[in-house]
Image (cartoon, coloured by chain):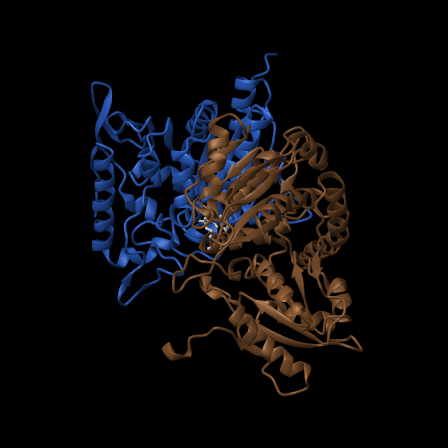
Chain colours: A brown, B blue
Amino acid sequence: MPIRKVMKANEAAAWAAKLAKPKVIAAFPITPSTLVPEKISEFVADGELDAEFIKVESEHSAISACVGASAAGVRTFTATASQGLALMHEILFIAAGMRLPIVIAVGNRALSAPINIWNDWQDTISERDTGWLQFYAENNQEALDLILIAFKVAEDERVLLPAMVGFDAFILTHTVEPVEIPDQELVDEFLGEYVPKHAYLDPSKPITQGTLAFPAHYMEARYTVWEANENAKKVIDEVFAEFEKRFGRKYQKIEEYRTDDAEIIFVTMGSLAGTVKEYVDMLREKGVKVGVAKITVYRPFPTEEVRELAKKAKVLALLEKNVTFSIGGALFQDFSRALINEKEKPVIVDFILGLGGRDVTFKDLDEALGIAQKALAGEEFDEVNWIGLRKEIL
Amino acid sequence: MAVRKPPITTREYWAPGHAACAGCGCAAALRLATKAFSEAMEEKYGDPNAFAIAQATGCMEVVSAVFPYTAWKAPWVHVAFENAAAVASGVEAAWKKVGRKGKILAIGGDGGTADIGMQALSGMLERWHNVVYLMYDNEAYMNTGIQRSSSTPYGAWTTTSPPGKYSIGEDKPKKWVALIAAAHQIPYVATASVANPYDYIRKMKKAAKIDGPAFIQVQCTCVPGWRAPPEKSIEITRLAIETGVWPLFEIENGDFHNIKIQAPGGGAKVKREGGRVVAIEFKKPIEEYLKLQGRFKHLFKQPEAIDQLREQIKAMWKTLGVEVTLPKPEE
Ligand SMILES: Cc1ncc(C[n+]2csc(CCOP(=O)(O)OP(=O)(O)O)c2C)c(N)n1
Ligand code: SF4
């Protein structure tokens, strides 16, 4: 029987790691995800998790050790956030290029400067071009589930790419919620053991990994990462379906909430989706036709799903906790790309909000709604809007 | 007729066909290292192939692993410039977990070890991974075109330490990574030279058989980097030993009071006290070493710079607990 425990997302991530039974974990503390390696070291200390836990001297070495272990053919896991993820940046490309299915749990946190430990999505968003799969959790249960799902997708032979699962700093990492911990046997059946087919640092079948490629081969190597990302779309659907069958919780790349007949659809990710669902419920009672679409899978980008979503609304209001300079938010770019050649397309309005842990309140959402309604009415509007900005201190 | 056993295994792990320059001392160092490793693995585990290599970006990586070819007959992984030690940590942890017997060899150049990789190296040694770290010391960043590293010797020309009106060339003394490694009190640290292959093989084998971390710093020539003729590679590194430029020593368990210093040869007079080398009187001046290399050519116009180098070499030996006399060339 699965047990339910009240826990923080950090603990949920550690539980996911325990259930996935990685053989090597290498991690370095950083707020807000410090508890993940702490909890894992407890599991290892108590013999509940039979893994090598490498207490590395930096995140750069954490991911490097994961690459080494994964290249040696075993399941590997790490956790980090913000500056830690940024320090890994160089090796993130390498992990993807070498097609190593490492999983990272990320407590989504703002990047310096100024130094700020609170939530936004800039850390993982900044790694969107590394080739890694990216999942975003709305709550602590999703943090646990998506890590298990990430392993399964990452290790699929049609994919073989590393994956990161983001969950919001403090809003999730440090907030307790009831979380269902699935049975170990069921997880074992779901994930199975990771046995790479091609030899990995095996002296009886030596291979060379991480070579240099001349212009004659580099593009093809990059293309295979592209292709694997494309393949991941189908694999993710399959894994979501299997997960639902086994564990009863349904996941979709884009989860829609009250979008049928919506004129304005808010699009967002992570825990903000929960807030916006509440807000939409409130508006619906007043007869405002709004809905929410939550991006659970950001890479591979669910282009087809976005196109379907776009057919439902007149305005897509993107709520983003990240900045892509001179563009707006990253989603704005992604959505524009997905819809640019569509014959009929909604208007897209972009909102940057909640950076560095600033609360996103219903008042902020009212402000965004007002602008989206202007767009709906065909009035002039700004494409990119910073919501909740304290202009008086600028 | 009796068939003599070859001095080292005929098995090859660093195969012919790599793209290193003719006369590259580092290529020889890697070839010997893997052979020695293989022998150690055979003796220890009964399996000559029971090892894997994690290598840093650098000349030796670039010349050996150009897709779709490889010069490696051992399992080998390259990740980045600064992290061979961290990657090796991960490989070792994985092997431990799956119960694979054997040892990991991490390889980095002086740049990837003394500079950008120093932190990862320290972490790996401190965590006591069962890894031999081999620093092949060609005394500059060769892969990017001969830039100075912290292991470049005083006075040497490199493309980022060019001699000029206000410059003598490299203006800092060489950083001795072996001593930094030994400060971690790991089981075994040694310096070696490709000019002394028997000693080098012995040290590699010893390191490979130890349970725990070991560090070996081997001096090896770079033909374009040292501006030296390819056929002089071994002669130059031998002169480094014989003139006092390159000390050969072993430090076990970080015991600096018990450093094993080796007699340099070349006519040097060694004074021992209680079996321990306390003084060496070198017979060959360092100029003999310097003059074979274009990278030191400019020093001969400024003999005070060579004297400066001599002082630094004395200071280095003093750290090792040895008083040395370094002769000046006869006029
Ligand atoms: C982070 C990073 N910075 C710089 C480089 C460029 N780079 C590659 S190899 C190298 C120098 C290698 O020098 P060394 O470790 O001494 O090895 P060698 O080339 O002499 O064999 C440099 C600077 C890199 N690959 N990665
Ligand atoms: S450049 Fe130097 S280190 Fe590189 S292969 Fe040639 S001789 Fe060896």
Q: Is residue B67 above or below residue B37?
A: below
Q: Is residue B303 above or below residue B64?
A: below
Residue situated in front as seen by the camera: A34 or A379: A379
Q: Among all residues in the image, which is located at the extreme right?
A: A343
Q: Is residue B306 above or below residue A374?
A: above
Q: Among all residues in the image, which is located at the extreme front?
A: A285
Q: Position of residue B35 (x, y in %)?
A: 54, 29
Q: Position of residue A163 (x, y in %)?
A: 62, 49
Can see residue A187?
yes
Residue situated in front as seen by the camera: A156 or A306: A306
Residue situated in front as seen by the camera: A37 or A167: A167
Q: How many marks?
A: 0
Q: Position of residue A276 (x, y in %)?
A: 60, 64
Query: Image quarter for residue B192?
Result: top left
Q: Is residue B169 left or right of residue A32?
A: left
Q: Position of residue B107 (x, y in %)?
A: 49, 39
Q: Among all residues in the image, which is located at the extreme top?
A: B1
Q: Among all residues in the image, which is located at the extreme bottom?
A: A379
Query: Image quarter for residue B78?
Result: top right
Q: Is residue A25 left or right of residue A161?
A: left
Q: Residue at x 60, y 62 (%)?
A: A278
Q: Residue at x 46, y 52 (%)?
A: A84
On-image quarter of the N terminus of chain B: top right
Can see residue B23?
no
